[in-house]
Amino acid sequence: MRATTLNIFLPLLAACLLLLSGCTIAQKSTPSKFYVLTAMPMSTEPLPVFENDPPNVGVSQVEIPGFLDRPQLTFRVNTNEVTYNEFARWAEPISAGVTRVVRQNLTELLGSGKVTSFPWMQPFPRKYMVSAVVTDFAAGKDNVAELCIIYRIADSKNQTTYMIQEACFKDSSGKSLTPDNAVVAMSDTLAQFSRAAAKDIAEVDQKVKAEAGK
């Protein structure tokens, strides 16, 4: 009888200890944090060249390479190595986040009501289309966040190319790039890109107007 009781008791004791051990591990595990990229402040002044007659612009969905198209934040170790932080994650797909921020930034730089992004709000009389392909967008190496991007400015039907540019934008605040600091720095590189793209749109618009006036 005593042996039978022990045979029943010991498995139950082991199961309870295993359950308690699992609870302890769960309590000690690091909770994930979720991040979003941020746009320029709404108080940002539009570029002076757009004060009178800024064009309407459409922003296509920004393309992201596979090694960046992940829920985790990407940190670059060196030229050939990246690492992913399992506990620092994007709150939205990174492609959607970049597209959203670029549209918001261009809205501030060109003027309210002048920029839309995919999916299109119809009807919207776009004069130019901006499409972009990101080739690198990570933080970590030498405490620098970097955005490398190829972008194209075309006509409203996306058929005539007015300009293609390839550029890299860096943010080096000197701070250790923790996930919190990294997202701020990465957002700043998108602001730098947006300013460059806005100036290129202005240059294209001036040329198109000059050609039309001939």
Image (cartoon, rainbow, N blue to C red):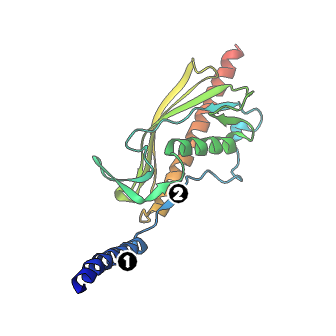
Residue, far left: 3
How far apart are the alpha carbons under marks 1 and 2?
Answer: 32 Å
Q: Label 2 near label 1: C-beta < 8 Å?
A: no
Give above or below for 7 relative to 179: below
- Residue 35 has which mark? 2
Residue 29 placement: quadrant: bottom left
| Closer to the camera in the image, 96 or 17 | 17
Q: Where is mark 1, residue-wise?
A: 20
Which quarter of the figure is the C terminus placed in? Answer: top right
| Closer to the camera in the image, 37 or 71 | 71
Query: Which residue is pictured at 39% across the width and 58% down the height?
Result: 85
SS at mark 1 in the image: helix
Q: What amino acid is labelled 1 in the image?
A: Leu
Residue 144 placement: quadrant: bottom left
| Closer to the camera in the image, 132 or 64 | 64
Query: Which residue is pictured at 70% across the width and 16% down the height?
Result: 212
